[in-house]
Image: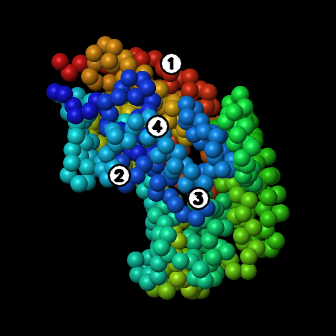
Amino acid sequence: MTPDHEIAIIGGGFSGIGAAILLDKAGFGDFLMLEEGDGVGGAWHWNTYPGVAVDIPSFSYQFSFEQISGWSRVYAPGRELKAYADYCVDKYDVRRRTRLGSKVVSATFDDETHLWRLETADGWSMTARFVVGATGVLTQPKPPDIDGLAGFRGTVMHTARWDHDVDLRGKRVAVVGTGASAVQVIPSVAPEAGHLTVFQRTPIWCLPKPDAALPRPARLALRRLPGAKLVSRLASQALVELTFPLAAHFHDLLPTAGAGERIGLAHLRRAVKNPEIREKLTPRYALGCKRPSFSNEYLQTFNRENVTLETTGIDTITESGVRTADGTEHPVDVLVLATGFKVFEKGNMPAFTVRGADGADLEKFWEENRFQAYQGVSVPGFPNLFTILGPYGYNGSSYFNLIETQTAHIVRCLRNARKIGATRVEVTNEANDRYFRSMLDRRKHQVFFQDSCSLANSYYFDANGDVPFRASPTLETMVTSRFFDLDDYAFADAR
């Protein structure tokens, strides 16, 4: 049976775009990319809140094969990342092989034909030999579980679905949450709001941001000076590697987190004048337990007279405001939910129903066996299915490095299948178990499993208390994705 397309790519963010480009470069051009939204870019299509920007240097946050010199800042604003996504889709002829407005709700593998059938929310369906899951994890907004939210009579919006028609000037605005999105949106809306109340459950580690505008001469140098892009990228990659992959996964061997904490506390002392507010903003967990942030404006915002930091727990949302556990009611006109995304919850991992060989359910498999995937790419029992951001795939480096690394792994599998005429590619149980054990064995070196992390309220942890990051330096991920043993997979022919 001939499928509609050889490959279906689910997700039109940078994961899907990168996979599409690299598959095409490798000779696998018969693909269709399915995207739920009305445009490409993923997180950078959906997230348009004030102040949205990348949180690692732009020199790292781009494809290695498509480095541009036009970023306006060291840390590019969101609109430039969205424009970069559109640019890549057009330059590499991906747009004509993209179907927008296509939310995949199920994928079912046929054991006889070795094909996947995908169904979308609007009733459309297609078949593909191989499926590449590129839905990411920062896509499904997570509303807070707070009583009374549905009865609030003011305006409610999540940072990931910002309503630009709402005028905040002079309004009483409340922001629930102090994670990475809040760190960007709070200083952006504070000058507009009549009064801003920030409801904080857990303070975030906030480090100074080495950001600056890139003037025209600097952009010209990047464009024309031989080696300038390479040097800037290497410097950026080194910074990223040092501040997360090495610091987090080799905490006991390379104690850089301690130095980071000292920098963060010094930044806090310089930024916040009031000692009581400063104390409330001081984290009680180690740097790295949850996602830290970089900002030169966030902490200073709490010096403003029109900003209140509230650390008493929320009891309920009333019709006209927020009531805290001490009985105080804070009147609110606009309620901003900076409460993050569904990451390891049901409905996001996986993002749709997946039934593999013999009807195996992927969500149930992970529920019963813990999150696991061979190099973050493949799961036994689910042939011809590959993921960009599967469990134990991302090591915390540049997300673009992950995309290129995982796609290299996928291409290696597909090339071998094509070479030997195989229509079914499935990772073996032995290979998956070996890889999963190796990840668990490295936990003793990671920052996540020290005692203070229990105070972090971190989305890094799943329901089993695991942190499904790939405990590897970036160079290791790049090498193993290209040179893993092909015997770790079983290749078969439908005939």
Residue 441 visible, this orientation? no
Q: CA distance from mark 3 to mark 4?
A: 25 Å
Of the residues under marks 1 and 3, which one precedes in the sequence? 3
Q: Please provide percent x and percent y for residue 25.
A: 43, 26
Residue with the mark numbered 2: 36
Q: CA distance from mark 1 to mark 2?
A: 34 Å
Q: What residue is at 44 percent from the left and 35 percent from the top?
A: 92
Residue with the mark numbered 4: 91
Amino acid residing under circle 1: Phe
Q: What residue is at 55 percent from the left and 49 percent from the top?
A: 81
Assess disc 1: are there few (<14), some (14-19) or many (≥20) residues with their C-alpha within 10 Å of its C-alpha.
Answer: few
Disc 3, disc 4: CB below 8 Å? no
Q: Please provide percent x and percent y for residue 257.
A: 73, 45
Of the residues under marks 4 and 2, which one precedes in the sequence? 2
Residue with the mark numbered 1: 483
Q: Nearer the viewer, residue 432 or 114?
A: 114
* Label at residue 52: 3
Of the residues under marks 3 and 4, which one precedes in the sequence? 3
Assess disc 3: are there few (<14), some (14-19) or many (≥20) residues with their C-alpha within 10 Å of its C-alpha.
Answer: many
Q: Please provide percent x and percent y for residue 460.
A: 55, 49
Marks 3 and 4: which is nearer the front? 4
Amino acid residing under circle 4: Lys
